[in-house]
């Protein structure tokens, strides 16, 4: 299944320590081998480390915060040192195909330096946290709308949908995920006859919802449209 995540059991710290002692007693050269391996350097692709950075950032700060200006644990240094001048050309290239470098700074170690996408010339999609936040909203809303499949496609259901999605977006705004000094500047939910749906939509059992999200500046909204096919009577 593409949407499955495996949760595998591991040893507790005490069990791991006991395992190390057992191996050290059974193999005379085991302790030296561990020391040698720990001291050796290996070159690894950055994708695994960045996946970890994103996961940590999502858990600590939220998907709407940029996974940048953050350290990478156990990374000694990138294989290719990058200067400030080189960084400018990578992060804001003329064609918009941005590269987010991993750089080393004195006193800070290896640091992720940039959070741009390959759509750098787009005012909407140039930043990773914006793109990922919209994905998060889209997935959350589509899942939430599934609960409305067997509801009648009428004003009461539209009001329920608006309230449910409004509460969800209000929580995001309160957590810093949407910009604006008040909710009306941060988001809007539209759902109803003559607003997002026609009489034909209602007869065909089609529920349409539109969200307006202030992702970058309060005065500019990203518009998301959703369609849910309601169950037939």
Image: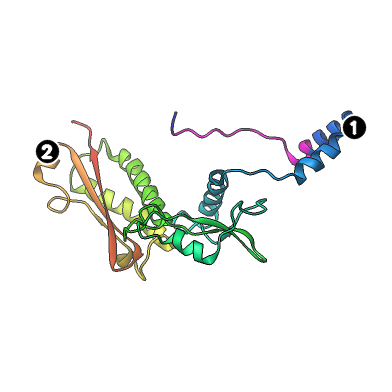
The answer to which of 227 and 146 lies nearer the viewer is: 227
Other residues around mark 2 within 10 Å, as few (<14) / some (14–19) / many (≥20): few
Other residues around mark 1 within 10 Å, as few (<14) / some (14–19) / many (≥20): few
Q: Give percent across and percent down for residue 52.
A: 56, 47
Residue located at (41% from left, 51% from top): 132
The answer to which of 18 and 104 lies nearer the viewer is: 104
The C terminus lies in quadrant: top left
Give left or right: position of 75 versus 122.
Answer: right
Q: Is residue 175 visible?
A: no
The answer to which of 186 and 44 lies nearer the viewer is: 44
15 part of magenta stretch: yes
Q: Is residue 105 visible?
A: yes
Toward which corner of the image does residue 14 lie, by quadrant?
top right
Task: State the residue position of label 2.
Answer: 203
The N terminus lies in quadrant: top left
Residue located at (61% from left, 33% from top): 8
Q: Is residue 91 above or below residue 26?
A: below
């Amino acid at each position: 299944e593409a949407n499955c995540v495996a949760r595998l059991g591991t040893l507790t710290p005490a069990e791991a320590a006991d395992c190390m002692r057992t191996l050290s007693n059974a193999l005379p050269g085991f302790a030296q081998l561990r020391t040698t391996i720990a001291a050796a350097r290996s070159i690894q692709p950055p994708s695994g480390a960045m996946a970890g950075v994103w996961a940590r950032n999502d858990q600590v700060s939220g998907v709407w915060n940029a996974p940048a200006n953050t350290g990478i644990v156990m990374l000694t240094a990138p294989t290719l040192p990058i200067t400030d001048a080189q960084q400018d050309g990578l992060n804001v290239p003329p064609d918009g195909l941005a590269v987010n470098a991993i750089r080393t700074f004195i006193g800070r170690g290896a640091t992720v330096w940039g959070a741009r996408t390959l759509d750098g010339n787009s005012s909407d999609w140039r930043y990773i946290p914006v793109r990922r936040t919209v994905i998060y909203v889209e997935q959350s809303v589509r899942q939430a709308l599934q609960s409305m499949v067997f509801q009648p496609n009428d004003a009461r259901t539209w009001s329920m949908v608006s309230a449910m999605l409004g509460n969800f977006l209000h929580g995001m705004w309160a957590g810093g995920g949407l910009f604006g000094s008040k909710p009306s500047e941060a988001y809007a939910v539209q759902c109803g006859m003559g607003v997002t749906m026609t009489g034909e939509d209602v007869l065909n059992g089609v529920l349409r919802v539109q969200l307006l999200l202030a992702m970058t500046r309060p005065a500019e909204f990203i518009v998301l449209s959703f369609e849910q096919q309601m169950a037939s009577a």
